[in-house]
Image (cartoon, rainbow, N blue to C red):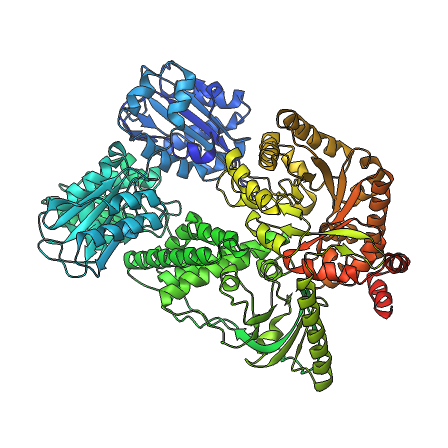
Amino acid sequence: MSADTIQQLPFSLAVTNILIVSAGTTQQQGEATHMLTLTANDIRLGCTATDWQDALNQASQELQDAGRTTPDYHAGMLAREQQSSTVLGNGIAIPHGTPESRDAVTSTGIRVLQFPGGVTWHDNATVYVLVAIAAQSDEHLDILRHLTRVLDKPGLSRKLAEADDTEALVTLLSKEPVVPKCDAQTLCLGVNTRTTSELAISAAARLQGLSCVDASFMKEIVSQPPVGLGQGFWLVHHSVGSIRPALALATPKEPSDDLAGVFCLAGPGDDCRELLERIDNFLAQNIPLESQSVDAVLSRLSGEQANAVSDRVRLLNTHGLHARPAKQLVQEARQHNADIRIRLEDGDGNSVSATSLTRIIGLGARRGQTLIISATGDDAEQAVEAVCQSINNGLGETVSPLRQQQSKPAPAEPEPEPLIDDEPLKAVAASPGLALAPAFVMRQPTLDYPATASDAGEQTSRLGRAIDEADGQLRTLIRQAEGGEAAPILSVHVEMLQDDDLYQAALEAINEGASAEAGWWLSIDTAARAQEALADRLLAERAADLRDVGRRVLANLCGVAMPTPPDEPYVLVADDLGPSDVARLDTQRVRGLITARGGATSHSAILARALGLPAVVGAGDRILTISNGTDLVVDGERGCLVPNPGAERRDRIDRRLDQLTRLQADAYECRNEPATTTDGHTIDVCANLGNTAHTPDAVDRGADGIGLLRTEFIFMEHPDAPDLDTQVKEYRHAFDALNGLPLVARTLDVGGDKPLDYWPLPHEDNPFLGLRGIRLSLTRPEILETQVRALLTAADNRPLRIMFPMVKDLEEFRAAKAIVERVRAEIPCQGLQVGVMIEVPSCALLAHTLAPEVDFFSVGTNDLTQYTLAIDRGHGQLSAESDGLHPSVLQLIRMTVEAAHAHERWVGICGELASDPQAIPVLLGLDVDELSVTSRRVPLVKACIRGLSREHAREQAKLALGKATAAEVRDALETL
């Protein structure tokens, strides 16, 4: 059971006979969270104790015996009891050590002891459940909050008390609570309609936008007539398509006696009991809904009386309402002759009795959040005032005021120097090609908004609406980009919008006085800066995705439209481009891309290559000084840009463009002809694909097959590992479109640099040299076997070639191939070939040992180059030196080809080098058998080969191998 599961264990029901003891260790910054795991071995049933000290001794000894704590920790637990009793009530106590005793915890653990006869605690309370928490961090606070929620489930207390089997007890304690959703986000107030059906659809759509229901729920609601509840309110309900119990309320802009609002309830009946109570609370007052404010509606749903005295108070306690301050609050509430209730202003809308310790802890209130205190009865006004004062005073703890939101002007940064006309500026070559067109500088609009706001509830509601709007915008873009490279990336953006950590961080800022805009951007900027600080460049570059998502929501909050490009052809210039920016590009008008930031692996670079647009990235802030309409040259092959080219340069560029246009037209016309040299040697030109949906396009462009299918796209598009049927369906699309042409599928290539949410990995200082590719797949052979099984099933005896990524030597290849052979024995596949990618220098150096056992090699020149030269190809300063034409890389390719041909194996090139016009003759001269490039480059690469002779190509290869640097190689080739 994971930490998340433990944190949702029950806590507050009547007499329960369990003792849970957990221990935790300090979580250093950057470390993975320690997991609290409960197993049958951690449970002790039927324990007895002479008194509370004996029970505590047994718990402490259990931890020591398991190697979780040292004997010194027990003294800390006793010292904590001397400060005040840790009894929660309902037969439960939560003893734990003092902060000074945390050093005595050695490792994380959980212990459960059952005391059927009960133990009398030192405050005379009878305790049946002891939750003794030992932790160097404050993880016990979250554990405690979640325990209170789960143990409150009806009947669970009796089951725990009567359990006589440890496995059954583990199962009971491992069950996660069903937490219903009914808060400011689920309210749709003031909808401009006068029909119950449209209000029902609005409420259901809100629940779908919050991921509480799916599309099938919407279908049921549309076909279901609302049921009248009286007072002008109506109800629609269904369990089909329910993901989480939830209640939405939609009210019309102009209510009437017949139509005041429609409740939309999702979930099975048993899980909706609390939500039905909310509706009952709402209708019980039997008065018109006079206010359309979020707070007024939530107040009514929570059961607060219309005549109740109420006030708001901000919680100042560092660790929120945990056990000690919660107990102080309960003791204060019990001193007054009033019914006092408490709810979180931005919580789930549920109010709890101020005299129930477990209920108050279950609120999970954090520092900075606003509590709404309401009371009815003779002493109501005095009670509310006293409770609020106690909270302001810290409830027995030393507290500090909330930080004030101060808007200090940022120090002025020096203006970047403008670019010089007709002078090239070097940058990172991101996508090959050449363009000359006027510039359109996509400057982000100025978003003015207040830094602070006093109405946290309304700000929370505004943020929820803006996120919903952004979700709809992104889903529209996904539909428009279906089948394209942008679609899966935009899907990740939708997931980011649903990231609860981002949302909660924004709420914390709002609760401390920030506006919705300021709170949201603080959350986004903090997360983005954290990613930018990572040593892993790939993950750091994903900060642009976070900011792209953040700007969209922020623009919605400010009511500002994003910039629109001109109608005529242009070169797009931007600080950075998010996937949604690229997805909106009209490729009939945009001629090239230039960004100030980013690297060769940033999403803007990946998408530019997929769209066939010349692009340079990482050009620096100076490009942002360019005026709209300035003529710009973008050279994506040489990695440079030129503003306002002079007459001589413009003539050269125009000639190159004319030549390129004619070459492209001729190449496309002959795209289906083989790539045969002038002296009769033919090699295959295949396509690299990141999605099976692009296979028909690759075939239409003349590809001789798929030379690289990056199968990880299937795994990245699903929240869980895709099953066999899902994979078979995806791969079958490709085989059907290929119509007998071969497909080379690279097995799953993920790791620390390309993580999967459902396959968590430990932090690695350098994930490029860590657990990735075939190394990672071999740790989960069942996933690799399922993928192989899916490929062989989908192939159905059509040409299939499977290759393993990041292989370093023969041992790894044999381990992976054994899985293929095991599956092949069950699913025969005629002509199946199994090979490896040459990405690691050791694999090239040992090609002679691999060649007898593999069917082919495919050289991934991108990774092979950076591993050989020890240069990150996305590095802003060094990327220009990360060149696949470096003699050392060419030597490794030569060794691979010679080893392969000695055993009659074929060799392909599937990196960017395969489409480099200067490299193609060299690769041909090295006797490679196949080149695999992006689909758009297939016709041009074929045309280039048709203009070469094999003899001349071998001369160029020999010349290149004799040089000392990549620059010397390119200079020598250019003079030929």
Judged left or right of residue 464, residue 562 is right
Q: Can residue 98 be seen here? A: yes
> Is 564 above or below relative to 498?
below
Q: Horizontal and vertical percent for residue 38? A: 46, 26
For residue 592, which quarter of the picture?
bottom right
Residue 19 appears in which quarter of the rendering? top left
Residue in the foreground of this view, choosing between 832 and 524: 832
Q: Is residue 784 left or right of residue 179?
A: right
Residue 196 x %, y %: 18, 52
**Image x and y of residue 393, in percent:** 30, 50
Q: Quadrant of the C terminus?
A: bottom right
Q: Nearer the viewer, residue 699 or 365?
A: 699
Q: Is residue 208 above or below residue 954?
A: above
Q: Looking at the image, is 292 positioned above or below residue 70?
A: below
**Most distant residue in the bottom direction:** 647
Q: Is residue 800 above or below residue 609?
A: above
* Residue for point 41% across, 58% down: 476
Question: What residue sits 83% from the left and 57% below the top?
Answer: 922
The x and y percentages for residue 173 are 39, 26
Which of the pair 295/735 is nearer the observer? 735
Residue 383 seen from this side: no
Q: Is residue 885 left or right of residue 131?
A: right
Say how many tags the image has: 0
Tell me which corner region of the image, top left, top right, bottom left or bottom right, holds residue 923: bottom right
Residue nearest the observer in this picture, 261 or 308: 261
